[in-house]
Image (cartoon, rainbow, N blue to C red):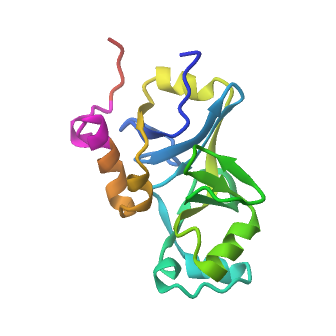
Amino acid sequence: MEDVNLTHQFLIAMPAMADPSFSKTLTYICEHNEQGALGIIINRPTEMMLADLFERVDLQLDDPLLARQPVYYGGPVQPERGFVLHRPLGNWQATLVVNHEIGLTSSRDILQAISEQCEPNEVLISLGYAGWTAGQLEWELAQNAWLTVAADPRIIFDMPPEERLVAAMHALGVDFANLSDVAGHA
């Protein structure tokens, strides 16, 4: 597992996942390298709507569709900090480039652009992120804590949150109901 790179992959939490932060989650991996991994949980909407978040940071959000989108629980690391997963990539002050079309931005300038021009229009805004130290994610994979599958941006940006985990499972060719909560090794 040494040379595995899960950037632009989905992590599907196995049914036996004991950590409540990750139970029944679908996580999009934005970066994975020798220092560790960073991802955003994409199927845990919070009670907060984007209109509320924008109001808290003194920005106007006039687009009614965007205003009603939920803010997501992105993970247990830095839950007070906002992250914008977006397509297209664009040019922002603090962006982690995932690939040629998707970025993860943590600077206010993207919120300003969403407020003023409704761009980028494909966004998932979270508070917090999921992080793994060097070798930790590889170890968790070896312990059967996760399944992985190539990410599909349509699952992130076009589907309701409650359908995303099932869609990723189907992309893998697995039915979640058939997964055992007992890990094993062949």
Q: Which residue is drawn at 65% across and 46% down?
A: 97
- Indicate the quadrant where residue 150 lies: top left
Q: Residue at x 57, y 29 (%)?
A: 137
Quick check: 67 left or right of 95? left
Judging depth in this view, the residue of 96 and 173 nearest the camera is 96
Judging depth in this view, the residue of 67 and 8 nearest the camera is 8
Q: Residue at x 44, y 48 (%)?
A: 25
Quick check: 158 left or right of 85? left
- Point out the stretch of residues depicted in magenta: 169-181
Image quadrant containing the C terminus:
top left
* Placement of 149 over or under 155, stated as above or below: above
Q: Residue at x 23, y 40 (%)?
A: 175
* Placement of 159 over or under 116, stated as above or below: above
Judging depth in this view, the residue of 122 and 77 nearest the camera is 122
* Placement of 177 over or under 57, stated as above or below: above
Image coords of residue 112 (percent x, y): 71, 75
Image coords of residue 84 (percent x, y): 62, 61
Image coords of residue 76 (percent x, y): 62, 50
Residue ranking furthest to the top: 186
Q: Does the magenta stretch include residue 132?
A: no
Quick check: 41 left or right of 37? left
- Indicate the quadrant where residue 120 lies: bottom right
- Please count the marks in the image: 0
Image coords of residue 168 (percent x, y): 34, 44
